[in-house]
Image (cartoon, rainbow, N blue to C red):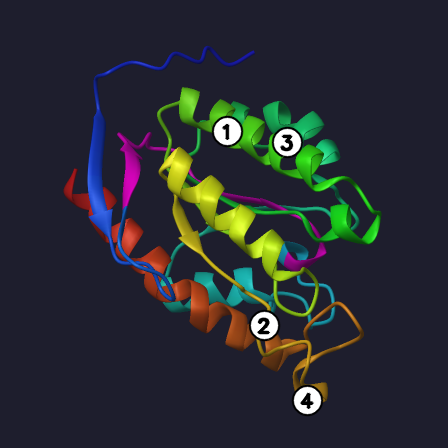
Amino acid sequence: MVSRRLGGAGLVLLVLWLSGCSHAPVRYLKPAPGPVVILGDSLAAGVGAPEGRGFVGQLEERLQIEIVNQGVPGDTTARALERLEEDVLELEPSLVIVELGGNDFLQKVPPEETFANLENIIGQIHELETPVLLLGVQAGVFSDKHGERYEELARRLEVAYVPNILEGILASPALKYDGIHPNEEGYRKLADKIEPVLRRLLGEMERI
């Protein structure tokens, strides 16, 4: 069991320019020397691309970092919450990327439940004094209202945020593997959206 304490030591607030939205304060908690971890579903797992060519593998290559990929195809926010302790918290990560919500929509989980689970996940990560990057799953899958919920959650919990990661991808046959997954080129476009925010986040962490 990981001991989780939220204290004032190491708490830093900064303004981070986020792609596609106005600048917002980001709760910046003093990072541990642990790994960068992504908690997600089939998008994080890279379904639809050759092994290692999903957006996570492409980000590793571009940023020259290792990301522990805890993406499980089919995962909902509820199932991710169940494995949060073992798959993420016990690793004492330096940064956690959260990519979840698509399967909740497909399985008709009430939005209130989805975003309550996301808030619970982020809250437990923050108890480790670990920063979070939230990826919004909206265009081509969710209505605009879901996008607004992601943004509201990110602002309220003061986490870094990349909106609409699937925007312009699933509407293009050249960028998708099937109806809900990008192909390698689609994941490249997805990585293009995430890279500037993640690069800035990692750079700020090094200066703490």
Residue identifier under label 3: 117
- Foreground: disc 4 or disc 1: 4
Furthest-front residue in this view: 145
The residues bearing labels 3 and 2 have C-alpha atoms spaced at a distance of 26 Å
Image coordinates for residue 154, horizontal then vertical, percent: 43, 43
Judge left or right: residue 22 versus residue 137: left
Q: Which quadrant of the view contains residue 10?
A: top left
Instruction: Report the front residue among 75 and 54.
Output: 75
SS under mark 2:
helix
**Marks 3 and 4, how far apart at CA:** 34 Å
Q: CA distance from mark 1 to mark 3?
A: 20 Å
> Do we see residue 136 in this rendering?
no
Mark 4 or mark 1: which comes first in sequence? 1
Mark toward the start of the polypeptide (3 vs 4): 3
Residue at image location 39% in from the left, 65% down from the top: 195
Q: Amino acid at mark 1?
A: Leu
Residue bearing the label numbered 2: 187
Contact check, label 4 and label 1, Cβ < 8 Å: no
